[in-house]
Image: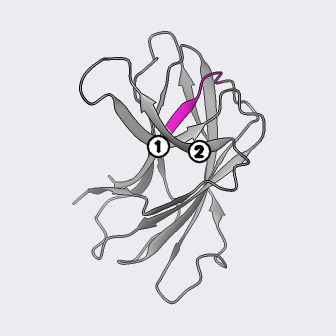
Amino acid sequence: MAGGPVTASSVYLGGGSGNIFPNFYAGGGGNASAHDEGIGVVASLGSDATAELRFPIPPTVPSGTMKLRCLALANATSGAAKFTPKDINVAAAASPSAATLTSEAQQTITWAVGDADKYKEVKLALTPTPAGNDMLVMAVTFNTSGWTLAQVGTFIFTLIWE
């Protein structure tokens, strides 16, 4: 049985030198639920910035392939955002800060005319194979090289199994 989404139980943005921050994206549609909470990234990112996340794995791991799902929002009609996740699963009684993270493939989200205020989605199959009750330790680096998004972006990360 596929599963998720699992949201991060911890998100640390303090190492991002002010380039990443907690953000509420305000949609322009005008309904009574127009805001999304996520990781905000400054417009025209000038240096790499890393968010640290912890995802608790359920006691019974769902079937399927574990993936990182990212939904991104920006009031933009052009530009690209790039990020590279690194991760490892860590069991209880092990040190999350001493675990060696494995780099995953860099992801690109591109905005074009008509994409403003719409969810942009990418899914990435992850390398670790967690056991029940593990913690997936992740660093997501927003990469300045190739970053052309000139608006603030908001990024929402979850784990899913498909």
Q: Is residue 152 magenta?
A: yes
| Mark 1 lies on residue | 38
Q: Nearer the viewer, residue 161 or 156?
A: 156
User: Which residue is the extreme one toward the front?
Assistant: 32
The region drawn magenta spans 149-154
Which residue: 46% across, 73% down? 135
| Residue at 62% from the left image edge and 32% from the top image edge | 81
Image spot of residue 62 (x, y percent): 28, 65
Q: Is residue 150 positioned above or below 13 on the image?
A: above
Camera-nearest label, 2 or 1: 2
Disc number at residue 118?
A: none
The reply to whether residue 120 is in sight is no
Question: Which residue position holds label 2?
Answer: 21
Measuring 45% from the left and 31% from the top, which residue is drawn there? 25
Between marks 2 and 1, how big is the CA–CA gap? 9 Å
Q: Quadrant of residue 8?
A: bottom left
Q: For the view shown, which residue lies furthest in the top direction?
A: 113
